[in-house]
Image (cartoon, rainbow, N blue to C red):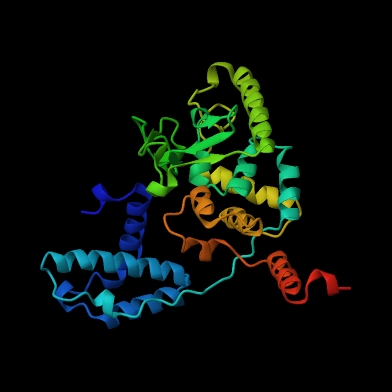
Amino acid sequence: MAAPNVRENTIAGYRVAVNRHLIPGLGAHRLDRLEPEHLEKLYAAMQRRGSKPATAHQVHRTLRTALNEAMRRGHITKNPASLAKSPRLNDEEIEPYSVEEVRKLLARAVERRNSARWAIALALGLRQSEALGLKWSDVNLDEGTLTVRRGRLRPRWEHGCADDCGKKFGGHCPARRPLRSDTTETKSRAGRRSIGLPDELVELLRENQDEQAAEREHAAQLWREGGWLFTAPTGDPVNPRTDYAEWKRLLKLAGLRDGRLHDARHTAATVLLVLGVAERAVMGIMGWSNSSMAIRYQHITQQVRQDVAQRVGRAIWGASIRP
């Protein structure tokens, strides 16, 4: 029921929750006899076995959505997932990278392929899927604009061999066949947006264009043209797993603390806060549908605290009486 109406990544998450957790944990119970306590025991058991609270919470949300549909269709009269206590999420404060740390990372990035990819992440806050889904047709270097139109999907493969190739996974098969398209629509309507490019980023993209032309010539007949802004050495779109590994490698090369790739998005949002960019403009740049997302992504850093303290000082004591 859900598959025709939700994004591919969403249905993939549903299937993991159902097949890995819900069926083994609750499949023996009759639907009309399912109680909130059964669910709470499952969540507790998941966390005892090592699942993170966020995973248990995602299972809870999936079950609640499914049982709401069952209730709407008259199969049950109440939703036990709405009555059960959901797993408690740990509120971990994200520490965005400082401007100095961003400069260090970008300095090392220019030594590697697709260096502009990281400038786009840290300066514009694009999601990984959005950055890897960009094509040259989405960029106007003369006007200095970039338009987000799609997101890159993680590739999934099936065996394409007539005989047993000896490989366990379809992705390792020499004749593998894709099970999904390269891209999908943006996460939300607000995600489809145009963003202005700093002059320095325009220059980085021009350099990336020249480097890609050289790689295209070197690869010759092996090159598979797709118009991608960032590519593998033979023209294919960058695999998100490869992209994630490169982020981790760059952090080590730059001598920075470990962090999630998504922390780059938090960093970009926080820089906009430091710069005092208007809320409406921030929403447009980040692709947020409502302003409440700022609470999650914009963080009160030491630089922000010091700036506020100095403003308060000037407002109360005035510049004339300060030593």
Q: Nearer the viewer, residue 28 or 277?
A: 277
Q: Nearer the viewer, residue 289 or 229?
A: 289
Q: Is residue 239 visible?
A: no
Is 104 situated left or right of 10 in this image?
Answer: right
Q: Is residue 87 visible?
A: yes
Q: Quadrant of the N terminus?
A: bottom left
- Residue located farthest toward the left when viewing the structure as drawn: 74
Question: Which residue corresponds to the image point at 69% horizontal and 52% vertical from the top-left?
Answer: 251
Q: Using the rendered view, name the quadrant where residue 55 is placed.
A: bottom left
Q: Quadrant of the C terminus?
A: bottom right
In this rendering, the answer to whether 217 lies above or below 270 is above
In this rendering, the answer to whether 65 lies above or below 231 is below
- Residue located farthest toward the front when viewing the structure as drawn: 320
Q: Using the rendered view, name the quadrant where residue 242 is placed.
A: top right
Question: Which residue corresponds to the image point at 52% horizontal and 47% vertical from the top-left?
Answer: 128
In this rendering, the answer to whether 303 lies above or below 148 is below
- Residue located farthest toward the bottom when viewing the structure as drawn: 37
Question: Which residue corresponds to the image point at 64% horizontal and 51% vertical from the top-left?
Answer: 248
Q: Position of residue 320 (x, y in %)?
A: 84, 70
How many marks are shown on the rendered structure?
A: 0
Q: Nearer the viewer, residue 130 or 23?
A: 130
Is 111 situated left or right of 243 in this image?
Answer: right
Q: Position of residue 63 (x, y in %)?
A: 28, 67
Q: Position of residue 228 (x, y in %)?
A: 51, 30
Q: Position of residue 295 (x, y in %)?
A: 52, 66
Is 191 situated left or right of 104 in this image?
Answer: left
Q: Nearer the viewer, residue 219 or 207?
A: 207
Is 254 situated left or right of 215 in this image?
Answer: right
